[in-house]
Image: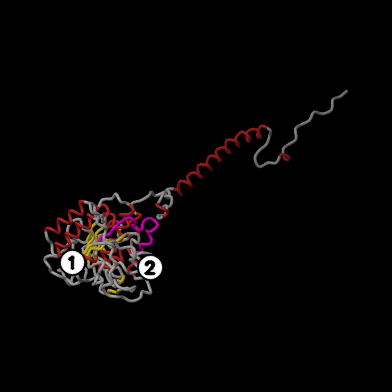
Amino acid sequence: MVVVPPAPALAAPECGPTGTALTAAPWAMNRVDPAAAWRLTRGGGVTVAVIDSGVSANHPLLRGQVLPGRDFGDLPQQQGQCDLAGHGTVIAGIIAGKVGSGAPFNGVAPSARILPIRVLPDSKRTNDPNLPLRIAEAIRWAVDQGAKVINLSLETLPRPELEEAIKYALSKQVVLVAAAGNQQQQQRNQPAYPAGYPGVIAVAGLDEQGGHVGTSVSGDYVDIAGPGLNIVGPAPRGTGYLTIPEGGTSFAAAYVSGSAALVRALAPDLTAAAVADRLTKTADNPPDGRNADVGYGMVNPYRAATELLGTRTNPPLGAMAVPPAEQDPWGDDRAVAIWVAVLGAVLAVLLLLVRPITRMGRARGWQPGRRQADAPEPSRPGPTAG
């Protein structure tokens, strides 16, 4: 028997655009504030598949976070780690960028790992009839590699093969998160795919003020929202960061995928549907609770991690405050009644004591209001004749 030694790991390729230095944390990370949930979970043990344009493994934010993946395009030897567009690397950085990279940026789930799967040569829209088939194959491969969350920040044509791949992933309890789509490419209320398939968490975009991003597709299939404007993320080549002012639902989906990884790590036995339900129920809801623009509202990693854990007297790691003791609405009236009863009893006792004392005094010639000295002296007998 001939034993073939394993092929040596390829060095991560240097490819794709470079960025600029980052001096301040992006608004999106401050708004979502995933660090609030890190006392409970950082996403450890969870693999998130990023089916996109590839993911760079060289950036300081992602070094050690990116697993060998697969390229379903024209660069199969690069294992999904060459990102010529920069799109997938930004997505991966938002999901699982590590803490302590030297820049004011981190991912939502910094202990999660990224499985890079390249199906897009760039970030341009395409009607390539083979793209849905590549995405379907990529989904199945990601599931078989053990991914627990799959991020789909892309749009394609609906095809039976793609729908079957979605069903396969859901049957394996894999959480599927997808961009809801952008209006300059879609008609309003026309679902984008794969976000439009049942069971997929469809993510819309919000701006700094919490408003719906105008380019984010609306529809009843939209489940939740994430930051989708003025986005910042790691560049695939070098140590800089890319800025995407126009944003898009692709990046909003990444914030939700990171949050799903936090929940997955904390509660690994939850079904995919239960994870989706937990994310939507704990989102920062719009005034009407849910609408076609933003679904249930902005994703909230802290609430997603803490909402269904612990008890009111024993919250998880002190994450939730113990509620104050309930006040008795009749407490004041009840206190007054008790004092009145006590005083009445005291007065009754005094009256019972006063009556016999008065009776005894009268028997001795004492009358109320008259001093004892004023009472007539008793008569004394005169001298007796001898």
- Asked if residue 74 is positioned above or below residue 310 in the image, the reply reads below
The C terminus appears in which quarter of the rendering?
top right
- Residue 73, numbered circle: 1
Q: Given the image, on which type of amino acid does mark 2 rest? A: Ser
- Residue 100, numbered circle: none
Most extreme residue toward the front is: 1
- Residue 101, numbered circle: 2
Q: Which residues are magenta?
A: 32-49
Most extreme residue toward the top is: 386
At horizontal 38% and vertical 60% (from top left) the residue drawn is 36
Q: What's the colour scheme?
A: secondary structure
- Measured as percent of width and height from the top left, residue 114 is found at 29, 61
Q: CA distance from mark 2 to mark 1?
A: 30 Å
313 in the magenta segment: no
At horizontal 55% and vertical 38% (from top left) the residue drawn is 348
Q: Secondary structure at mark 1?
A: loop
Front-most of residues 10 and 186: 10
Residue 261: image quadrant is bottom left
